[in-house]
Image (cartoon, grey):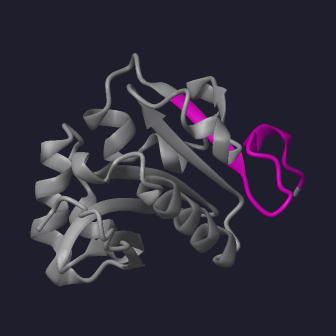
């Protein structure tokens, strides 16, 4: 039961658990998103579930005081129903609750979507080293992917402008 019905089953957003890994990987593969690093970061992922089916996912990959927002995917039958927005909003809230400074992401398809959450396009060399060293940056995403950032908690996303 993947498709929402006219009686619209609402998707529930929750923290991912180890038992979600096969379904998360299946959804990411179906959306042509990389699997590298997912297993290790799964504890910082959130999923959307409806009727016992996993219909969306978004993850954080923590890198010191920052994080990479990654693996945002929604089953096609659930797109344009607010599931992706709920997942990204929850991931941002989780990052803020952890006291992280900024979120970064790479995208080849959603450059127009993420500014609605406060993300701005930046140059790769403005990304902190710890984030640039993730598999997502070094192996999984093409050099042509747009790089975006969003400050958290009133701190600038550009590490060269941070005091301290």
For the point 68% across and 70% down, the residue is 96
- Above or below: residue 122 compared with residue 79: above
Residue 163 at x, y percent in the picture: 90, 52
Is 115 rendered above or below residue 16?
A: above
Identify the magenta region: 147-163
Residue in view at x 31 percent, y 52 percent: 74
Which picture quadrant has residue 123?
Answer: top right
* Residue at the farthest front position: 6
Position of residue 104 in the picture relative to residue 51 (left or right): right
Q: Residue at x 38, y 69 (%)?
A: 45
Which residue shows up at 27% across the image and 68% down it?
A: 40
- 44 horizontally vs 150: left or right: left
Q: Is residue 149 magenta?
A: yes
Q: Position of residue 61 (x, y in %)?
A: 43, 60
- For the residue pair 53 and 66, the one nearer the viewer reads as 53
Rendered location of residue 63, percent (x, y): 51, 59
Relative to the observer, which residue lies in front, 50 or 96? 50
Count of numbered circles in the view: 0
Instruction: Let me know if residue 35 appears in the view.
Output: no
In the drawing, does residue 103 fall left or right of residue 53?
right
Q: Work out which residue is located at the far top of the displayed protein and give it.
A: 144
Which quarter of the rendering shows the N terminus?
A: bottom left
- The quarter of the image holding the C terminus is bottom right
């Amino acid at each position: 039961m993947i498709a929402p019905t006219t009686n619209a089953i609402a998707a529930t957003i929750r923290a991912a658990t180890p038992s979600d890994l096969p379904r998360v990987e299946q959804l990411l593969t179906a959306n042509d998103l990389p699997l590298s690093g997912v297993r290790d970061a799964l504890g910082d992922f959130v999923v959307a579930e409806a009727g016992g089916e996993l219909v969306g996912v978004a993850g954080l990959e923590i890198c010191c005081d920052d994080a990479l927002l990654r693996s945002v995917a929604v089953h096609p039958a659930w797109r344009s129903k607010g599931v992706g927005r709920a997942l990204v909003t929850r991931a941002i809230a989780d990052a803020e609750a952890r006291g992280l400074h900024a979120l970064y992401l790479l995208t080849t398809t959603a450059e127009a979507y993420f500014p609605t959450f406060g993300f701005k396009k930046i140059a790769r060399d403005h990304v902190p080293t710890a984030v640039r060293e993730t598999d997502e940056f070094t192996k999984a995403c093409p050099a042509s992917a747009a790089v975006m950032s969003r400050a958290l908690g009133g701190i600038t996303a550009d590490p060269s402008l941070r005091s301290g």
